[in-house]
């Protein structure tokens, strides 16, 4: 069987690099960061800026909130059969102070999740078909380096 092509589940929202990054915007006028990126105008209600730069966002942050989903979401979500519970975390990015949602890597035991836990961006398979592996960003625990 030939290798499947690895593609992002959502084009342009993140890189497929060895050290993946989410791709956002930064307003040139007020400095606010946004994810997902847009190209038209600043979303900060106190700013009327229209010049936005695409920027790679921090790949580390801390858990701001989290939950574990024990029920399969409805279509168009593609769930494995049998369904396996998964966790989702709202992570505050370290530099931007922007909160981004994402699945938690299955290697993290949901019982160990806690607010303030340091995590970093990783890539994981959302689903596969006969030709492609559809990839999304996920959050994984930061290994202690010492």
Image (cartoon, rainbow, N blue to C red):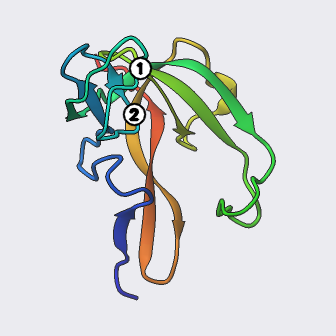
Residue at 73% x, 46% y is 85
The image quadrant that residue 21 belongs to is: top left
Give the SS element for disc 1.
Answer: loop
Using the image, determine if residue 145 lies above or below residue 25.
above
In the structure shown, which secondary structural element does the residue marked by tag 2 occupy? loop
Image position, residue 143 (x, y; %): 38, 26
Query: At x 53% / y 19%, what residue is drawn?
Result: 63
**Left or right: 17 with respect to 92?**
left
- Neighbor class of circle 1 (other Cα within 10 Å; few <14, some 14-19, many 20+) is some
Residue linked to disc 2: 35
Q: Is residue 72 above or below residue 105?
A: below
Calculate the distance from the C-alpha at mark 2 to the C-alpha at mark 1: 8 Å
Q: Position of residue 46 (x, y in %)?
A: 39, 11
130 shown above or below 139: below
Circles 2, 1 touching at the beta carbon (< 8 Å): yes
**Quadrant in which residue 37 is drawn:** top left
Residue sitting at x 18%, y 21%: 28
The quadrant of the picture occupied by the C terminus is: top left
On residue 98, the disc is: 1
- Camera-nearest residue between 7 and 68: 7
């Amino acid at each position: 069987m030939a290798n499947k092509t690895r593609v992002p589940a959502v084009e342009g929202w993140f890189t497929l690099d060895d050290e993946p990054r989410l791709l956002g915007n930064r307003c040139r006028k007020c400095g606010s960061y946004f994810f997902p990126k847009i190209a038209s105008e600043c979303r900060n209600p106190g700013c009327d800026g229209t010049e936005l730069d695409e920027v790679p966002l921090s790949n580390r942050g801390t858990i701001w909130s989290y939950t574990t989903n024990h029920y399969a979401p409805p279509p168009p979500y593609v769930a494995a059969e049998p369904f396996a519970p998964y966790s989702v975390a709202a992570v505050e990015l370290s530099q931007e102070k922007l909160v981004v949602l994402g699945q938690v890597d299955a290697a993290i035991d949901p019982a160990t999740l806690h607010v303030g836990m340091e995590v970093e961006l990783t890539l994981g398979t959302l689903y596969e078909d006969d030709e492609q592996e559809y990839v999304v960003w996920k959050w994984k625990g930061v290994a202690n380096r010492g």
